[in-house]
Amino acid sequence: MTTDEKVTKAEDILKDVLNTTETNNAEASQPVSKKVRTKKEKSFEQQIPKGKPKSGRIWKGEKKRFSSIVKTRGIRLSMSKKQKLREDLKRVKEMSKAIKEEKQAQKEARKARRRANLKRAAENQKKSEIVQVITNTAKLKKIKKKHLRMIQKRDTLNL
C-alpha cells in the first residue's frame, strides 16, 4: 500500500456523521425528539460503505424484504374494453383450434394413405411371387438347411 492512497474507515465516517448531527441538533431550538427520516435521508448503516464480503462474492448485493416492495394495482380498463379483449381472445382461440383440427385431419389422411399403399404393395408382392409346389415331401429331407429357410408354407387355393 502506497502512502498517497487514502483509507476510509467506518469509525471515521461515523464520527463525521455524529458531528454533523450534533451541530444540527445544537442549531435547532426544539428539544431532541425522534427524528422522522425522509426518503432522501439515509440511515447510519446505509452511509457506511460496504467492504468486501467474507465469502468473496462481491457481485451479491443486499437483499430486500418482500414486504418493502411496493406493488401497483395496474391500469383499470373500462367494461367495453374488457369485453372487446375477451371477444378478441375468444376469436383467436377458435381460430387456433380450427387450425389444429385441420392439421390433425391432414395427419390422419396421410396415415390412412400410407396404410393403403403398404397394403396394396403387399398384395402386389404376393401376386408377383414365383411359386413352386412341392408334391413329394420326401425331397425336403435331402434339401440343405440354407435352402430350407427360404421355403414357406402357403395356402395355394387363394392365389
Image (cartoon, rainbow, N blue to C red):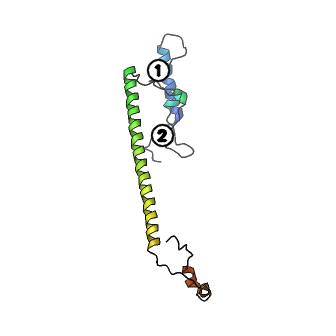
Q: Which sits in the foreground, 50 or 123?
A: 123
At label 1, which amino acid type do we have? Thr
- Rendering coords of residue 159 (x, y %): 49, 72
Q: Residues within 10 Å of mark 1 (few under 14, many from 20)?
A: few
At label 2, which amino acid type do we have? Val
- Rendering coords of residue 56 (x, y %): 54, 46
Give the foreground label among 2 and 1: 1
Q: Is residue 95 above or below residue 82?
A: below
- Rendering coords of residue 155 (x, y %): 55, 72
Dot placed on the residue nearer the N-terminal end, 2 or 1: 2
Identify the residue shown where x is 39% and y is 45%.
Answer: 102
Helix, strand or loop at mark 2: loop
Helix, strand or loop at mark 1: loop
Identify the residue shown where x is 42% and y is 40%.
Answer: 97
Report whether residue 93 is seen: yes
Identify the residue shown where x is 49% and y is 30%.
Answer: 47
Identify the residue shown where x is 54% and y is 27%.
Answer: 67
Q: Residue furthest top?
A: 30
- Rendering coords of residue 13 (x, y %): 50, 31
Q: Residue furthest bottom?
A: 142
Dividing the picture into quadrants, the one containing residue 148 is bottom right
Report whether residue 78 is seen: no
Q: CA distance from mark 2 to mark 1?
A: 30 Å
Q: Is residue 134 above or below residue 9?
A: below
Q: Residues within 10 Å of mark 2 (few under 14, many from 20)?
A: few
Q: Is residue 113 above or below residue 64?
A: below
* Contact between labelled residues 1 and 2, with CB atoms less than 8 Å apart: no
Residue on which the image places disc 2: 7
Q: Is residue 8 above or below residue 18?
A: below
Q: Which sits in the foreground, 115 or 9?
A: 115
Residue on which the image places disc 1: 38
Where residue 84 is drawn, which disc sits there? none
